[in-house]
Amino acid sequence: SIDFFLSHSWSADGFWKQAAIYICFSTAPAYKLMMLSSILVLLVGCVSFLIGLLVNPLFKHRNTMVFLDICCIPQKDPVAKLYGISKLAEYLRASDKLLILWSPDYLDRLWCVYELAVFLRTHDKKDVVLVNLNHIKLCVSLMFLQLFSILTLCLQLHYESTHNPYIGYLLGLVTSILIGREAFTCSKEWRKFCSRVRRFSVREAKCTSLADYYTLKQLITDMYRSEAEFAAVVRCLWLGGGKAKSFPTWLFSWASLRIMCAPYIPLIVACAVDYIVCIATEESFPMVPTYSQSQASPVPA
């Protein structure tokens, strides 16, 4: 039994595919590790979160079996490659989940469409997991920008810089522009995706080999009786009976929220611990500047 079958377009960026896999499989344990270590120091907490993303799969998912075509099917031996491709349907049927590393050209790739068609014949729709690679880019970018902003402001406060307010305003402006721009891009991309699904047709999907093109089309037709029937299944999968959802499921997923909130958890915990220590040691800090009588300015009459 295969736990996850990774379906993806080969033209999409491999780095962000790998990042999406780490985030999907490792955010929850990495989050717990970050929460525990963040009591020590803000920077250590964020570093441990990143380390947890990379190290956790070596332990928690050691027994998780994943199928990735470019790795599991030999690419240099033509005979072995043809044999692996011929068994692709069996690998899909033996997989518990189909993890789609989605890129804008996913439904334009006939092999990707074929993988989806084979999987849906033997599995429920809930077993199809879609991860938007561009959304992963947004979450990771925001995480590092927020971490940089927090560290910069903490250093400015520590050294009591007079430019602290301006730096805070600048960082807030940059963050707002980035969030607004990328959120608009994600929204536009989702609308484009819904439009693409509404007019989805198997015959519009492309394949580098003309022989494979006709073979795969025929296999899909044999499974679903016609290309139109399979297109209806795809529309029902992501549009829910023809009506587009108000927002994509991946937009407010737990993995996304964990990534974007990661820099703030150590900060909140560190501030809480610092406040408790101040109360315990009976240290007080004035909310407004205080001056000695000699330094005070005379009150005008």
Image: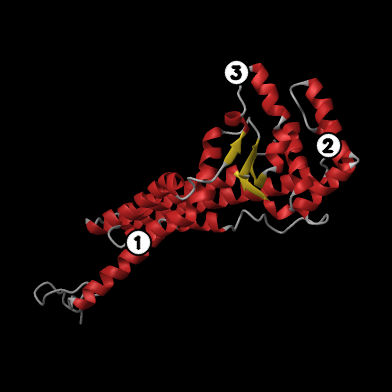
Instruction: Return the x and y of residue 114 as percentages of the image width and height.
Output: 76, 36
Q: Nearer the viewer, residue 43 or 145?
A: 43
Element at badge 2?
helix
> What amino acid type is highlighted by mark number 1?
Leu
Quadrant in which the C terminus is drawn: bottom left
Label 1 crowd bin: few (<14), some (14–19), many (20+), radius 10 Å: few
> What amino acid type is highlighted by mark number 3?
Lys
Instruction: Return the x and y of residue 221 as percentages of the image width and height.
Output: 87, 37
Q: Nearer the viewer, residue 277 or 70?
A: 70
Q: CA distance from mark 1 to mark 2?
A: 50 Å
- Quarter residue 271 falls in: bottom left
Q: Is residue 74 above or below residue 29?
A: above
- The residue positioned 60% from the left and 24% from the top of the image is 74
Label 2 crowd bin: few (<14), some (14–19), many (20+), radius 10 Å: many
Element at badge 3?
loop
Mark closer to the chain start, 1 or 3: 1
Mark closer to the chain start, 1 or 2: 1
**Colour approach in the figure:** secondary structure
Would you name the residue on which mark 1 appears? 36
CB atoms of marks 3 and 2 within 8 Å:
no
Would you name the residue on which mark 2 appears? 220
Mark closer to the chain start, 3 or 2: 3
